[in-house]
Image (tube, coloured by chain):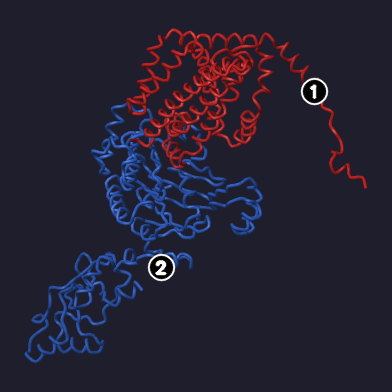
Amino acid sequence: MNTDWFYDFPFKIPIDLGAIDNAVRTFSAKYDSFFNVIRSGLNGFVNSIYNILNFIPWFVLILFIITAGWKLSKKVSTGILYGALLFLIGVAGLWTLMNETLSIIIASVIISLLLGFPLGIVISTSDRADRIMRPILDTMQTMPVFVYLIPAMLFFGLGKPPAVIATTIYAIVPTIRLTNHGIRQIDREVIEASLAFGSTRLQSLVKVQIPQALPTIMAGVNQTLMMAISMVVTTSMIGATGLGMEVLIGVNRVEIGRGLISGTAVVIIAIILDRITQGFVQQSEVKTDGQ
Amino acid sequence: MDNNILSLRNVSKLFGSEKNKALKLKKSGVDKDTIYEKTGVTVALWDATLDIKEGEIFVIIGLSGSGKSTLVRCFNLLNKPTSGQIYFQGEDIGKFNREQLNDYRRNKISMVFQQFGLMSHRNVLGNVEYGLEVKGLSKDERYEKAMEMISMVGLGGYENEPISSLSGGMRQRVGIARALANNPEVLLMDEPFSALDPLVRKDMQFELLTIQRKLNKTIVFITHDIDEAFKLGDRVAIMKDGEIIQIATPEEMSEHPADDYVSQFIDSADKTQVISVRNVMITPNSIVRLKDSLNYSINTMRTNGVSSAYVVGKKMKLEGVITIDDAIQARKKGLTISDILIRDINTTSPDALLTDIMSMAAETPFPIAVVDENNSLKGIVSKVHVLSSIL
């Protein structure tokens, strides 16, 4: 008996992969001028952040981190530890590379917040929008990054602009999700109360819903930041310079020391930024608890 | 519309998508649960018609799921009814545009919530100020008004406290202060005291009555506690499965319950809070006049099988009471009724509640005399009558 059909699908749809490639290329060529505007805009944005970071003397930034760590954890030792770690990056000769990496992270996070926060609010007000957005957000989070790394490169060329785009696509999701979640989980009676006293929608949103959702929203911002940092090495593959590029070169050339030192620097940045934003999350929690 | 401040006319509220189908089923007499099974539509409120008078406390009572919270949210359109009209001072509020509706909510009607609905990111003052803030009052006006309300509900000195540091009772005081700060004409209260423990609840009920007397607001009060309903309500509406079954004063309701459901509900209540002396008093069958002879009075008491008789003067004016023993003694000595008359006796008015005369009834050796404002005898209440009316 022929059992081949157990293991073979009855038919195959011929997918013309070449056509998809061509379509993307034609699209990028056709709207080249449009993408150019975005590219130069993003470039300017990242570079100005980079210039600001470079303008700040190293000890000022370290002092700032020490104070922030101290104030948020209420322990001087924590602040000093953060400062010492940052100092290590500097003496390892990675300070400018760190600034470069930071400028991409900061640019991506700012764009994520500017887009994600309003989007999260919109989704929170409409169940239909929530249903439509959920699979899109799932896709953005689970699609292998490399898949959109290449189109990003096609549209925006090599360097920082496609890195910012790719990082934003990946990192924006928690901001949208947690803004939505934060607003939806507010006690129904609290929102009813705001409406029962004759608030307009905007008043209810600004005076009640956003402040009530703030701890959750801040947790989303923290997540976005962490995810942006996790993209540092990946985006170096499309030419984003900085600590990630150092790691990539280290790996490619089997220069273990080079990779290890730069990798450690990324970890230090991640820890410091995580703890400081966590501190903000806790502060906003304390505030909504009203203490 | 005479003095009706709020009126509902055939108001229904259905939740779900296949409303038209559900509406048809409901009209053909299918019950709520079957409609839900067939269409997935919840009939939360059905054909509610009622009038609320200015200055009264109108209580809506029902078990959970009976539609009382849905009903109260119709008054400020937190729930938009599926059909029917809602009138505030004769105006159809369903026809309000957004601006008019906000205006109505800001100035005419406010609400107190079961779980308080307080904003945890604001302190006591910030919460009480909220309604004034959305209204656009200046900071100074807001502060002044809010502080006045805070001290009225007895929270003076707590204005800068965070909500999380307050007890349940104090939180609901904040809720009440916030609702009153707008100086509304109607106060909607959705089970405001259900989340509080019994002792605090009693305090708050008392306080609410005090505030009501002082400010004379119209209050629509939701509860599932029949004692609370009868204690606070000038009139009570009882709800079951989204429909209003009876609207009456507590007294009427306990005297003439509309159906078995209502009487079951009332059976769980403490009736002494509701029933007044008028309902249990009887006309005494042994009354003697001051000028009657002792022989006559002894005979009257004997025929009626009682050991004491009330003595009245002109126009049924109560003079006192005599006992049969005294009368027999007095007849031997040749005295008159006025010589053996006991003048120091307990009296009560026909409008007093049973709960008020309980201790008196327990102590007095004679039945309690019920007299009107002119001190004329209207009836008597004995221990037996009090007891039998409760059981």
Q: Quarter-wise, where is residue A126 in the image?
A: top right
Q: The residue under label 2 is which amino acid type?
A: Asp
Chain to which mark 1 belongs: A
Residue B29 locus on image (x, y percent): 62, 59
At horizontal 31% and vertical 27% (from top left) the residue drawn is: B139
Q: Is residue A71 left or right of residue A258?
A: left
Q: Is residue A81 left or right of residue B36?
A: left
At horizontal 39% and vertical 64% (from top left) the residue drawn is: B252
Color used for chain B? blue
Nearest to the observer: residue A119 or residue B243: A119
Q: The residue under label 1 is which amino acid type?
A: Leu
Nearest to the observer: residue A138 or residue B381: A138
Residue B150 locus on image (x, y percent): 28, 39
Q: Both on one chain, marks 1 and 2?
A: no
| Residue B330 makes an appearance in the image | yes
Label 2 SS: helix
Q: Is residue A32 left or right of residue B177?
A: right
Label 1 SS: helix
Question: Can you tell which mark lies on residue A17?
Answer: 1
Chain to which mark 2 belongs: B
Check disc 2 and report the residue beneath it: B267
Chain drawn in red: A
Residue B345 locus on image (x, y percent): 16, 73
Q: Quarter-wise, where is residue A32 in the image?
A: top right
Position of B61 relative to B294 (above/below): above
Nearest to the observer: residue A136 or residue B195: A136
Q: CA distance from mark 1 to mark 2?
A: 78 Å
Question: Does the residue at mark 1 contact the one at mark 2 (Cβ under 8 Å)?
Answer: no
Task: List the single residue furthest toward the bottom.
Answer: B332
